Amino acid sequence: MKTKRIEKTFADLKQKNEKALVGFLSAGDPDIKTSLKIIESMCKAGLDIMELGIPFSDPTADGPVIQRSSARALKNGVNINAVLEMTRKIRTFSDIPVILFTYYNPIHSYGAEAFYNDALSADADGALVVDLPPEESDEMTSKWPGNELALIRLVAPTTPFERMKKIASTASGFIYLVSKTGVTGSDGLNTDDISVHAKLLRSVTKLPICVGFGISTPEDVKRIAPHADGIVIGSAFERIIEGNPGNPGINEILGEQVSRLKKATTSSTRR
């Protein structure tokens, strides 16, 4: 099963007393060829899990940086088919888990069953559908012919405990704990709040917990790592891409940043 790759990643990291560095990129930004070079450099630099964003025209959960990265990818004609082909190419140089990050509209247009089958065929490991709550996800999962594709669920700081239990019961792979209210890339991290929410979530699930939103520096990672099994970073990577248009060494810059962030995941252990 594809979920086994995710499970093995977290198990191996636990043995090494490390936390997962989960990196998000909008697939095809700034273009498909450069995007693949960036991903390869990031994987070689120590990235543990890749969140590959399927570009969408109305990414309501994302901040301005990722909105613009998605728009650039859309201008390049990047769609689900292109992202699946990119996933196949990633498998030529890396075996890390690949999570397809998307909104529901692209899957609905593509067809839920076709998405499931084609994602597995491309050797993806999971999907995170950011705007599809458990109450409405049967429309998609009822058409999935199996459970090999992990369904990553989101839990927000405002999620009530009973709802948290319901979300956790339908999740697989890992659970994405949103660090704060707002959108991706916004400032402000409250470590005490994150600790409380992580402990509460850990009481209702045995799945790994990855914390994301607003994490951008090695110092941020060091602060959050004791409370999580993984750290999700996206806007910080896309900000570098946006700030280096046409730079032929952009892949090396991203690789170096991954290396710095990955080292920060090994400096703390869970409390």
Image (spheres, grey):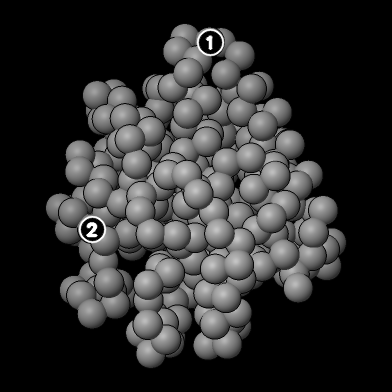
Nearer to me, 245 or 162: 162
Name the quadrant of the C terminus: bottom right
- In the image, what residue type sits under mark 1? Asn
Q: Residue at x 37, y 37 (%)?
A: 66
Q: Which mark is residue 104?
A: 2
* Residue 214, position as x, y percentages in the image: 50, 48
Report the disc number at residue 247: 1
Q: Please give the name of the residue rendered at 60% of the width and 67% of the height, measured from the top-left corner.
A: 192
Label 2: element kind: helix
Q: In this rendering, is residue 200 above or below 4?
A: below
**206 with respect to 177 (left or right):** right
Compared with residue 170, is residue 221 higher up or lower down, i.e. above or below?
A: above
Q: Nearer the viewer, residue 266 or 49?
A: 266
**Residue 16 appears in which quarter of the rendering?**
bottom right
Q: Position of residue 167 (x, y in %)?
A: 39, 80
Q: Secondary structure at mark 1?
A: loop
Circle 2 packing at 10 Å, graded few (<14), some (14-19), many (20+), is some
Residue 220 visible in the snapshot: yes
* Among the 4 quarters of the image, the one containing residue 78: top left
Task: Indicate the amino acid at tag 2.
Answer: Tyr
In the drawing, what numbered circle is on residue 138? none
Residue furthest to the left: 109
Mark 1 vs mark 2, CA separation in Å: 33 Å
Q: In the picture provided, is 72 more to the left or to the right than 121? A: left
Dot 1 crowding, Cα within 10 Å, few <14, some 14–19, many 20+: few
The mark that comes first in sequence, 1 or 2, is: 2
